[in-house]
Amino acid sequence: MSKDSVIKDQLAKAKKRVETLKNFYKHLTVYVVVNGFLLLVAKRVTFIFLSKEALGNPGFLEWIDWNVYGTPIIWGIALLLHAANVFISSPFKKWEERQIQSYIRKDREETEKFTRR
């Protein structure tokens, strides 16, 4: 493997890593903005309707509460999984890299055998 191809491979890996980090931070930003908005709206909606009787449907405020507090919890779990995928090194990634290197080595050996004949 030439020095140029090694550098290109390292550059490609670095770019992929940066793209993965950017996607995580975008996800985090959207999570904070959307859930912050939901919490602000929930307080305003609760203030406007003041009581369950004012709505005519007492279950509506409970529905709002479930959505306002359930959304950040469920989405937060998904965000934590995304963070774990981005920041915690997985043994599967190391296995994948070893397999790739193994196949490259085998292909190189086969090519060398073929060219020797």
Image (cartoon, rainbow, N blue to C red):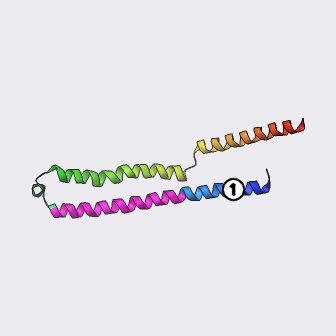
Taking the magenta stretch, the answer to whether it contains residue 31 is: yes
In this view, 91 is above or below 32: above
Magenta range is 21-48
Q: Residue at x 53, y 52 (%)?
A: 86
Place of residue 67 in the rendered image (x, y in percent of width and height, measured from the top left): 28, 52
Q: Residue at x 23, y 54 (%)?
A: 64
Q: 10 Å neighbourhood of mark 1: few (<14), some, or many (≥20)?
A: few
Classify residue 62 as left or right of residue 13.
left
Classify residue 110 as left or right of residue 50.
right
In this view, 62 is above or below 92: below
Residue lying furthest right in this view? 117
Classify residue 15 as left or right of residue 60.
right
Image label count: 1
Place of residue 93 in the rendered image (x, y in percent of width and height, measured from the top left): 60, 45
Place of residue 110 in the rendered image (x, y in percent of width and height, measured from the top left): 80, 36
Is the stretch drawn in magenta largely helix, strand or loop?
helix
Of residue 40 and residue 90, the one placed in the foreground of this image is 40
Disc 1 is placed on an element classified as helix
Q: Amino acid at mark 1?
A: Gln
Q: Residue at x 68, y 42 (%)?
A: 100
Taking the magenta stretch, the answer to whether it contains residue 76 is: no
Q: Which residue is mark 1?
A: 10
Q: Residue at x 49, y 53 (%)?
A: 83
Classify residue 115 as left or right of residue 59.
right
Determine which quarter of the picture holds residue 45.
bottom left
Question: Could you tell me which quadrant the C terminus lies in?
Answer: top right
